[in-house]
Image (cartoon, helix red, strand yellow):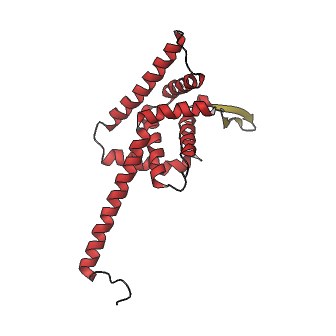
């Protein structure tokens, strides 16, 4: 999966936020991500005080903190909502939830340049592969992402857009039927 695959969905989210959402939508997205970062920071501080913690959850918390330092929270929120929109819009692509969760975490980590490995090539240093993330760390990251509910908001935006499109189709059909008469079915013409 490439970032270019996700761009149309992020654009849909952006259009929705700029046209339909309340004026404080961006503040809400900042607050939601700030709470996730605060929880990750509290988790890391607790482990530094000697409280036992799961290694994978600790890695996930560190990844969230690192990401928040590198990327704007609105960009992160739009990406997560875009993934939710994509999930709702294209069910066949996301047949299994585990694949969706993995790709969502992967796309989130992609925003952070620290999560990539760089290699020298003829053109200089190039970004080649992403750091390997253990499956349990992916699960821990997904639990953090899921707690923000941003993916769910993207799903809800997709449902609302589909509902609006269907209402527009119904209106067009009603206008057509008013002008042309109702469509005959069963070959009775």
For the C terminus, the image quarter is bottom left
- In the rendering, at what x and y percent does residue 20 appear? 30, 48
Position of 44 compared to 33: left or right? right
Residue at 55 percent of width and 34 percent of height: 139
Residue 12: image location, x then y, percent: 41, 50
- Say above or below: 83 vs 39: below
Residue 146 image position (x, y, % from top left) = 45, 36
* Picture quadrant where residue 103 is located: top right
Q: Which x, y percent locates residue 13? A: 40, 47
Of all residues, the one furthest to the bottom in this rendering is 189
Query: In front: 84, or 108?
Result: 84
Is 100 placed left or right of 82 in the picture?
right
Q: Is residue 148 left or right of residue 142?
A: left
Residue drawn 32% across the image and 38% down it:
25
Q: Furthest residue to the left? A: 178
Task: State the residue in front, 153 or 54.
Answer: 54
Residue at 45% over, 31% down: 72
Rendered view: 141 above or below 17: above
**Against 16, is 29 above or below?**
above
Answer with the quarter of the image where residue 130 lies. top right
Q: Classify residue 166 as left or right of residue 142.
A: left
């Amino acid at each position: 999966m490439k970032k270019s695959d996700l761009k149309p969905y992020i654009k849909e989210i952006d259009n929705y936020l700029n046209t339909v959402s309340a004026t404080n939508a961006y503040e809400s997205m900042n607050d939601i991500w700030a709470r996730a970062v605060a929880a990750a920071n509290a988790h890391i501080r607790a482990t530094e005080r000697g409280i036992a913690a799961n290694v994978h959850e600790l890695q996930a918390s560190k990844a969230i903190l690192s990401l928040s330092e590198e990327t704007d929270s609105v960009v992160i929120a739009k990406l997560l909502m875009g993934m939710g929109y994509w999930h709702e819009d294209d069910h066949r692509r996301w047949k299994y939830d585990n694949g969706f969760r993995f790709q969502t975490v992967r796309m989130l980590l992609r925003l952070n340049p620290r999560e990539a490995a760089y290699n020298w090539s003829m053109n200089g240093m190039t970004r080649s592969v992403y750091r390997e993330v253990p499956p349990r760390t992916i699960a821990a990251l997904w639990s953090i992402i899921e707690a923000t509910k941003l993916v769910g908001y993207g799903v809800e935006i997709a449902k609302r857009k589909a509902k609006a499109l269907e209402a527009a189709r119904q209106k067009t059909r009603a206008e057509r039927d008013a002008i042309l008469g109702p469509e005959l079915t069963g070959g009775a013409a």
